[in-house]
Image (tube, rainbow, N blue to C red):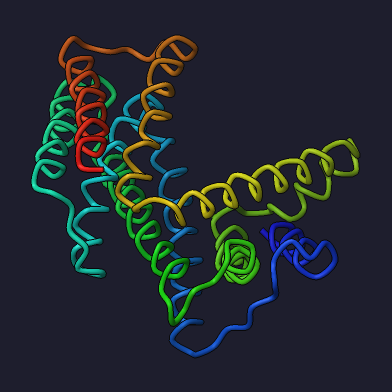
Amino acid sequence: MLACSLLSYIAIEWLKIAPLQRVRSRLQLLKISALGIIFCLSVVGGNISLRYLPVSFNQAVGATTPFFTAVFAVVMTAKREGWVTYVTLIPVVAGVVIASGGEPLFHLFGFIMCIGATAARALKSVLQGILLSSEGEKLNSMNLLMYMAPIAVLVLFPAAIYMEEGVIGITVALARDDWKFLLYLLFNSALAYFVNLANFLVTKHTSPLTLQVLGNAKGAVAVVISIMIFKNPVSVTGMLGYSLTVAGVVLYTEAKKRNM
């Protein structure tokens, strides 16, 4: 995450890709901090859920993100979509409910963590949209990422030391054994930076709800790949739920096209 902040600073100060923006108020800093913390919670919750749930079911649950996004958008911004749009979210959520009942490897704690991570991603999208588009607190994508990354580090680093015993020593040992390990870390950081930057750039030109629904296409692909590669056991009920969720995503996309 610090690499993400450094890359943003280089792009702003040296390459002059975007102007440097200062944090204008304590409220704005609080929102940026909340965004960083929520991002960390969504990542940690998602990773924990993968210890108890197969990737396919994890991604299917993640498809309910638009539902939570719609709720948070109404509560935090009072921005409402057309009623048809909300109707199309019903099969998205219903599909996950059906898939839950037919999932052979269902685990309650893993399911709770997965739902929590999904809700956190939805809240992050809405808050991210506010920080990128609000006239009083508008930040461009690179500045937002530059300020958010150190906050995420302050949360994740102590949590990693507490939850993963000896993580620092293990990391140092891996780096000593193979110097390419550091290159892998650097590449992973750079990739994470560009993925998050692309996500922020897209948010500027669409609603948080649309962003989350379109992102579920990735989830549908992950379900198929997980079943093919990891040979996760699936049931007819589970596949019916997955199919209904994907159908809901398609219906939502069509509803948005008609409203444009």
Q: Quick one: 232 or 66, which is closer to the camera?
A: 66
Q: Quadrant of residue 236?
A: top left
- Residue 12: % across, % down: 75, 67
Indicate whether 235 appears above or below 33.
above
What residue lies at 28% left-to-right and 36% top-to-bottom? 61
Residue 22 to residue 82: above or below: below
The quadrant of the rendering that contains the C terminus is: top left
- At a point 68% along the width and 42% down the height, the residue shown is 191
Q: Work out which quarter of the rendered image holds the N terminus and state it.
A: bottom right
In the picture shown, does residue 124 fall above or below 189?
A: below
Measured as percent of width and height from the top left, residue 155 is found at 55, 67
Expressed as whole percent of the image width and height from the top left, the position of residue 116 reads 30, 52
Q: Nearer the viewer, residue 116 or 48?
A: 116
Q: Residue at x 43, y 58 (%)?
A: 41
Q: Residue 91: percent from the left, percent from the top?
A: 13, 31
| Corner quadrant of residue 240 | top left
User: Which residue lies most toward the bottom here?
Assistant: 25
Answer with left or right where residue 204 lies relative to residue 160.
Answer: left
In-image side of 170 versus 88 (left or right) = right
